[in-house]
Amino acid sequence: MVSLAERPGTGYEIGQQFTRSIGHFWSATHQQIYRTLKKLHTEGLVTFESVPQDGRPDKKVYQLSDSGRKALREWVESPVEPYHLRDELSVKLRAAEHGDPRVIIEEMRRHREIHTARLRLYQEFEKDDYPDPSVLTGRRLNQYLVLRGGIAVQTAFLDWCDEVIDALQARLPHN
């Protein structure tokens, strides 16, 4: 519904938006998107317009209904439970004394590389899409603030990776 609040679209277009932006913090497969659109339509929260296509079935362009906008507003204003970290890497690190510390260090380095790439991507989004955050309002400001949260999370994770790697390396036996 958030995607449709930003702009009407087909299931495919919503999927593309997930690939480009929303999917960095909330994932959904194309199947989930289409199932959800069908359910939202059944509940009267979205409507669609059938658009004819040459040689293919009509495409459905969805948009929020008045009931959908009301439901979205109620959802946005409702309390959310705090984020609960469920991270397999942290559990493995807790049990690291049962494994080879060099393997654990390499796994931390691998995660560090992945999160470094993600941080760079987010920073590129910030540079390209929000060159002057001081003028942002409305939806653009909200999107920017979510992006800043992603940057903060990635930065903190990289700091933690460095701390773990340094601590484990300092305790390796010197041969």
Image (spheres, rainbow, N blue to C red):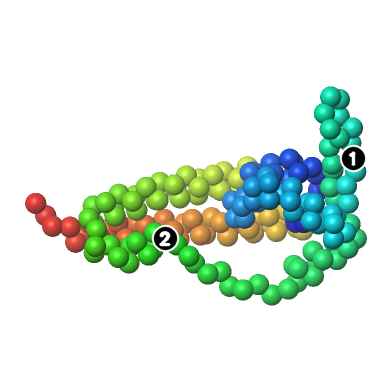
Can residue 139 be seen? Answer: no
Packing grade of label 2 (10 A; few <14, some 14-19, many >=20) is few
Towards the viewer: 24 or 136? 24
| Earlier sequence position, callout 2 versus callout 1 | 1
Please tell me whether residue 71 is drawn above or below residue 47 in the rendered image.
below
Q: Residue at x 64, y 47 (%)?
A: 29
Q: Which residue is the extreme one toward the left?
A: 175
The answer to whether residue 126 is left or right of residue 138 is: left
**Kind of residue sitting beneath label 2:** Glu
List the residue tagged with mark 1: 50
List the residue tagged with mark 2: 88
Towards the viewer: 163 or 9? 9
Q: Which residue is the extreme one toward the top?
A: 55
Label 1 near label 2: C-beta < 8 Å? no
Q: In which quarter of the view is residue 17 placed?
A: top right
Secondary element under disc 2, as helix, strand or loop, is helix
Please tell me whether residue 99 is drawn above or below residue 62 in the rendered image.
below
